[in-house]
């Protein structure tokens, strides 16, 4: 990235006011939290790999705001970013994750048996179910900062780990740079292909450098378990299928993820995790579980109800368009998923999705019959 | 040692071959020139401000090629880049600038009295005339690498210098970030406004960071002399007007530029210049004069002639669409300008445009009357 940290020496010749970014038109978590005092305190610091404060905040400086979502506006370049820049990142984490304090502990629970129900969401309404998370591999810097050598090493480790999976997880790796047209078409048809980032949120953070070198997609033969390598995080792990059997999706997710983690541990490259932040990922919004469990669900009536957003807020759920995080919904079909990532476990978050979607489908059915739903509106979870 | 270019140290732990970029699908000057041996030699180095080899070449890795133009694929982050990375940049410069050798000397000639003719290009064909160049302010890093403090200092110095201009050069500065809608619309209507870069060639090298902070446009009251601050170079200086009086355009260009240079020298921040590379700019393609003198000219018949490209080449001219460097021509109207930048003086290059365009228009007139032009085709200049 342009900030060779030797350049930090030059920058220190300028006063804090002269280097402090203009955030007057900005509305993201970083812009809300950053002050001249914090900037002054942290600007002469660097992580062991040389990541600086300006590296952390550049994406938030370059992207003032987004019409649909409150963006975070900062990224980590390595595991140590969250420690070295805690004076900035702790308040952002607190702001983003519902008041999570620097002293709080995060619980990890990937035992799918602890999930109650979830196998009976109505497939007339729930079109598909999906659970994703991210994982970072200890010992390497993160996508905004890593070199080609590091990225390729991550790819190599990942391919070794994944190709050793068997049974329902047996599958194949498709490197982006050597994909044939036929393979590419197939992956597009399966909705598996990830494209070079175009979102300026990602490109301004340096995550698209050297594309498509070191990037690829692995999936099992059944196309129900999928891993993205070196996109926004070192690994993105996804379990998905058509219909409403979230329980099965979550089972496959947990089992597959655990197997992968074991293999990485054996190679002395476990996942970045600590008891305060849980799984450490590139974007502070994904700390904790990194988990987004969601469905594509038809809610044409409920979504136009005056209390739709309030209901979602109370259920601790979030809506997106079916094209992903920064798209609008089409035809009354929404992507509904957990809003939380940090401070509650994987099981707890998926439970909220399962219970919440079940309720919303019941509400939709009531509205179809012209009945009121006010008595069904839940208390704040 | 704090702020050594730390991430560079980490990368060096990987063998050079592991860090070497994949350029198999690439077609730009950098990809043609760089080899694993050059990469290995230069990757340990950095400029005093911390610009590294990977910083120089990142844009060329991220942008394999362009349909209309052979891109350079590398940029400078500061004046010293051209020295520290000469083993890569000297051959790139040689390839790009017609065999210009590391021992060659470049001559600067900004005396408009040396231009012969140029005041009588036929306005029925030549719609507008324009001369532009770039200038870098010594003591500051270049747009791919500069900090906000540096960029703002360049802006402040520029405004101070430009505000002292008088007579027909007297003008006003419009900072991009304070622009009112009315001002913005006026600048768009005048074809003066430069927008946030969208070209990935520029984005990948970091030139759009912190947009629009520190960027602005200055122009005189007649709107014939214009300076862009902190776009692709510290300064872009432009003289332009309707019609074919290139002599007047060049007069104004030289007069204004010379005055501005004097003002910067007085403030102890002269322009980056040396006797080998002439004016030092961000992109190696703009070294030397940094000058592009051109016209928008109607050549609907000539442009369809089989020998059009050959004629342009012999005249050492280049065609572009009227939307700028990476656009296509519309309706037979072309942007015709000098192809060279380095190894020729400003006067020589503008003379080449004046004489060449005069000939092209005569050829166009002949073709209109269905007369052959073969005898008019010039020898290689």
Image: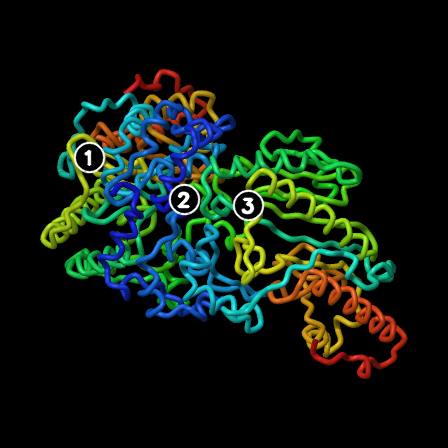
Q: State the CA–CA distance, disc 2 to disc 1.
A: 23 Å
How many other residues sit within 10 Å of disc 2, few (<14), some (14-19) or many (≥20)? Answer: some
Subunit of label 3: B
Cβ atoms under marks 1 and 3 closer than 8 Å = no
Mark 3 and mark 2 on one chain: no
- The residue identified by callout 3 is B137
The N terminus of chain B lies in quadrant = top left
For the residue pair A379 and B348, the one nearer the viewer reads as B348
Q: State the image quarter where residue A279 is shown.
A: top left
The image shows residue A279, relative to residue B245, as above or below, that is: above
> Which residue is located at x 72 percent, y 73 percent?
B315
What's the CA distance linking mark 3 and mark 2?
Answer: 31 Å
Q: In the rendered view, does A36 fall on the left or right side of B374? A: left
Q: Secondary structure at mark 2?
A: helix
> B254 or A7: which is nearer to us?
B254
Observer-nearest of B18 and B139: B139
Q: Are marks 2 and 1 on the same chain?
A: yes
Give the residue displayed 47% in from the left and 54% down from the top: B76
| Residue that mark 1 sits on | A278
Closer to the camera: disc 3 or disc 2?
Answer: 3
Image coordinates of residue B82 in percent, x first then y, are 46, 58
Q: Check chain identity for marks 1 and 3: say if they share one.
A: no
Could you say where residue A163 lies in the image, as x and y percent from the top left? 19, 61
Q: Are marks 3 and 2 in contact (CB under 8 Å)?
A: no
Residue B141: image location, x then y, percent? 47, 46
Q: Chain of mark 1?
A: A
- Residue B164 as seen in the image, left or right of residue B1: right
Instruction: State how far apart marks 1 and 3 are (Cα).
Output: 48 Å
Q: Is residue A312 above or below residue B247?
A: above
Q: Position of residue A157 (x, y in %)?
A: 20, 57
Q: Which residue is mark 2?
A: A202
Mark 1 or 3: in front is 3
């Amino acid at each position: 990235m342009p900030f060779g940290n030797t350049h930090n020496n030059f920058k220190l010749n300028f006063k804090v006011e002269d280097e402090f970014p203009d955030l007057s038109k900005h509305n993201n978590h970083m812009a809300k939290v950053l002050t001249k005092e914090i900037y002054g305190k942290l600007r002469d610091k660097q992580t062991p790999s040389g990541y600086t404060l300006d590296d952390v905040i550049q994406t938030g400086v370059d992207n003032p705001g987004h019409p649909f979502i409150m963006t975070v506006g900062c990224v980590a370049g390595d595991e140590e970013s969250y420690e070295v820049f805690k004076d900035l990142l702790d308040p952002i984490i607190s702001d983003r994750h519902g008041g999570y304090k620097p002293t709080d502990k995060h619980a990890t629970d990937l035992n799918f048996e602890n999930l109650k129900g979830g196998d009976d969401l109505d497939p007339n309404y729930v079109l598909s179910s999906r659970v994703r998370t991210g994982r970072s591999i200890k010992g390497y810097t993160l996508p905004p900062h890593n070199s080609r050598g590091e990225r390729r090493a991550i790819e190599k480790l990942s391919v070794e780990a994944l190709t050793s999976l068997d049974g329902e997880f047996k599958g194949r790796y498709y490197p982006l740079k050597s994909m044939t047209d036929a393979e590419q078409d197939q992956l597009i048809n399966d909705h598996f292909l990830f494209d070079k980032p175009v979102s300026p949120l990602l490109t301004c953070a340096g995550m698209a450098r050297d594309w498509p070198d070191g990037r690829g997609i692995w999936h099992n033969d059944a196309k129900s378990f999928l891993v993205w390598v070196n996109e926004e995080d070192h690994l993105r792990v996804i379990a998905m299928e058509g219909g409403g059997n979230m329980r099965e999706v979550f089972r496959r997710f947990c089992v597959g993820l655990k197997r992968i983690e074991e293999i990485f541990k054996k190679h002395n490259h476990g996942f970045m995790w600590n008891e305060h932040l849980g799984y450490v990922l590139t974007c502070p919004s994904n700390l904790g579980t990194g988990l987004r469990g969601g469905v594509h669900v038809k809610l044409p009536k409920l979504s136009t109800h005056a209390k739709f957003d309030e209901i979602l807020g109370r259920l601790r759920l979030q809506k997106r368009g079916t094209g992903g995080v920064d798209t609008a919904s089409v035809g009354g079909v929404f992507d509904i998923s957990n809003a939380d990532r940090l401070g509650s476990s994987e099981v707890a978050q998926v439970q909220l999705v399962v219970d919440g979607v079940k309720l919303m489908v019941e509400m939709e059915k009531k509205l179809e019959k012209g009945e009121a739903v006010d008595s069904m509106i839940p208390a704040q979870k | 040692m704090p702020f050594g270019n730390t991430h560079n140290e980490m990368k060096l732990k990987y063998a050079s071959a592991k860090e070497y970029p994949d350029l198999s699908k690439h077609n730009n000057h950098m990809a043609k020139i760089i080899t694993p041996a050059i990469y290995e030699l230069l990757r340990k180095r950095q400029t005093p401000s911390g610009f590294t080899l990977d910083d120089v070449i990142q844009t060329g890795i991220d942008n394999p090629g362009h349909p209309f133009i052979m891109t350079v694929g590398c940029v400078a982050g500061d004046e010293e880049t051209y020295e520290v990375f000469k083993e890569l940049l000297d051959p790139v410069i040689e390839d790009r600038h017609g065999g210009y050798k590391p021992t060659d000397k470049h001559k600067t000639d900004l005396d408009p009295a040396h231009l012969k003719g140029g005041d009588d290009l036929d306005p029925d064909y030549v719609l507008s005339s324009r001369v532009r160049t770039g200038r870098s302010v010594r003591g500051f890093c270049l747009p791919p690498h500069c900090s906000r403090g540096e960029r703002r200092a360049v802006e402040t110095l520029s405004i101070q210098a430009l505000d002292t201009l008088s007579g027909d050069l007297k003008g006003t500065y419009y900072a991009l970030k304070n622009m009112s809608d009315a001002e913005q619309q006026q600048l768009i209507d005048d074809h003066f406004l430069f927008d946030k870069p969208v070209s990935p060639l520029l984005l990948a090298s970091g030139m759009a960071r912190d947009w629009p902070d520190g960027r602005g446009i200055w122009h005189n009251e007649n709107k014939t002399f214009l300076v862009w601050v902190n776009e692709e170079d510290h300064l872009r200086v432009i003289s332009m007007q309707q019609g074919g009086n290139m002599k007047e355009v060049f007069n104004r260009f030289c007069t204004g530029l010379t005055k501005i240079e004097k003002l910067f020298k007085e403030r102890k921040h002269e322009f980056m210049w040396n006797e080998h590379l002439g004016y030092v700019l961000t992109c190696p393609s703009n070294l030397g004069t940094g000058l592009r003198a051109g016209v928008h000219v109607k050549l609907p018949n000539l442009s369809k002639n089989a020998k059009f490209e050959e004629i342009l080449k012999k005249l050492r001219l280049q065609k572009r669409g009227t939307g700028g460097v990476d656009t296509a021509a519309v309706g037979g109207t072309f942007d015709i300008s000098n192809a060279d930048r380095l190894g020729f003086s400003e006067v020589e290059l503008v003379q080449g445009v004046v004489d060449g365009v005069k000939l092209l228009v005569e050829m166009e007139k002949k073709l209109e009357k269905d007369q052959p032009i073969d005898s008019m085709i010039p020898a290689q200049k």
